[in-house]
Image (cartoon, rainbow, N blue to C red):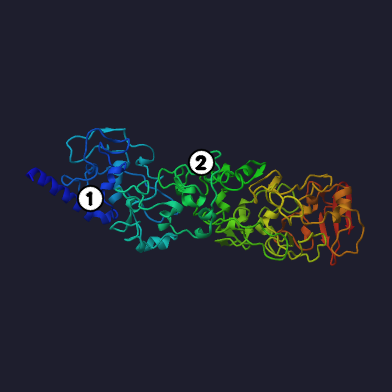
Amino acid sequence: MSRRRNLAARAAATLALAIALAAPTFIAMPAHAAVATTKHNLSASGPGTRRATSETEICIFCHAPHNNAPAGQLWNRRLPSTTYTPYTSSTMKSALGQPNGASLLCLSCHDGTIALGDVLNRATTIDMAGGALSGNALLGINLTDDHPVSFVYDAALRAMRGELADPATLVKPSKVRLDASGRLQCTACHDPHDDTNGKFLVMPNIASALCVTCHVKNYWAGSDHRNSAQTWNGTGINPWPHTTAATVAANACESCHRPHTAGGARELLNYASEEANCYSCHNGNAAAKNVQAEFSKASAHDVGNYTGTHDPAEASLVTTPHVECVDCHNPHAAYATALPTLGGSAIPALPGSLTGVPGINIGGTAVNPATYEYEICFRCHSSTNSVTSRTARQIIQTDMRLELQTGSPSFHPVAGVGRNSTVPSLLSPWTTSSRVRCTDCHNNNAGPYSTGTGTTPSGTNPNGPHGSTNPQLLERQYNVGDPSTESAAAYALCYKCHNRNIFAVESTSTTTPGTFPFHYKHVVDKRTSCNVCHDPHGISSTQGNSTNNARLINFQTTVVTPSGGILRFIKNAGSGGSCQLICHGENHNPYRY
């Protein structure tokens, strides 16, 4: 063997040994010959569109046995001197600085500031064909849309952040590993020498196996986004444009998130518009029901009116008014359950779609997670964020939590069983022991329980208060104008639970306890809306009392005016009462019932 060939062989052996010794900073590497078949082979023999015009050496674009930079791995490139803008998030507990270690080496190509052919052991830059990096390979210097790197991942971080794997497990034999300093670098997920799994990933990411090696999300095991076998029907835009997986479960985290060049930098979402990440499946092209269409109805939770307002770290009580899908749904926890059972004496169970969401309980205390549906509603519909009533009333209260207090003079039984033990108008299966959900009244006008008595699902559209053609997101029609002609349709919402015959059939009987025999005279004869006398949520105990505001009495002041300066209802000790007021020109001064 000639001296020249001997020196070359020794140099090659030195390079191989040095790279092998340096492997703990990266990962355990396969045979380096594998690089030759990947895009990281930038030599003239490389398979990619970007390759040298004549340079034949493969490893030279990253490594050299001599004249290398003081960066480990016998590095053959200049280190970037730029200042990067790192990822940021309200849930981030690490103080991110500038990239270092293996991540900085990766960025010497992938930030686009140093030419691919600019290596240290060549006197001139290697000529390259195919142009500079572009697309997803070009991360740039703004890393806010990329997974954070170069931060210390230790037990303290895990304790502060939660939902993270034990850092002690991120060592060999785990394919996902921290570097020698306990930092998470690009090489925790990527092996630059092996593209067997695509995108140079250290392991396949089907069902987000790579993601969940570090991210241990609460509720994830039972969620639909982990388990659903739903596929894209081929209509419209592909909901998973950056993956090759075919089902929701196979895409898992990547159904919503993108680790690099994410469209929405916050939480690395696929799209900057929060709801667009949900619509990509929940437009009926992957999910079973088209929820997106519901938001275009006349009355809706207008998620499209807000962008960037919701914050995953925000308090349970929403102080900056907004509404996004994730204010009510936890995408890491939500799962489909059977339609709710209406009526009966059981406390309404929280559906799987609302699992793992914070709320405000009836006492005004933050709870996480919420136990009851109304606690999630109270996130916005309590305190100062409540929607103003469309009815001018004698007592004005926009805080739903105060109206529905179980200590209130009267209330619909949402947070507890109602005060009235005799309500003969109730339709089966409703009883005075039943509790109702907010969504028994506020729901899709074409939803499962939008017709009939509510005991048998009939509508085919999605369940939930996403949108309705009726005002106030009501499931059924409820006329509040005066006068209003009585019909089954005019008060369909009331007649879902209350027997229409009690109100729409004339009767003067006073023998049935708890009945009001003159409903017909008011509702049918005088065409007075139920809403004129009754406030459907309830009357706060801070404003009303059990004598004047029993039976949800809170008069509509555009119809009912004082008589002799007095406007009131007085509940008698028995089942009757009296009114002092003027209504439709008739002076009740007082009228006893």
Tell me the amino acid under the disc marked 2: Asn
Q: Is residue 302 above or below residue 580?
A: above
Q: Residue at x 27, y 37 (%)?
A: 115
Crowd tier of the residue under label 2, counting other residues whose Cα lies within 10 Å: few below 14, some 14–19, many 20 or above: some
**How far across and how far down the image is residue 530, in percent?**
80, 51
- Mark 1 falls on what kind of element? loop
Mark 1 lies on residue: 73
Labelled disc at residue 238: 2
Residue extending farthest to the front is 1
Q: Is residue 100 visible?
A: no
Residue 548, relative to residue 13: is it above or below?
Answer: below
Q: Secondary structure at mark 2?
A: loop
The disc at residue 10 is none
Marks 1 and 2 close (CB-CB < 8 Å)? no
Asked whether the viewer can see residue 451, the reply is yes
Q: Position of residue 27 (x, y in %)?
A: 30, 54
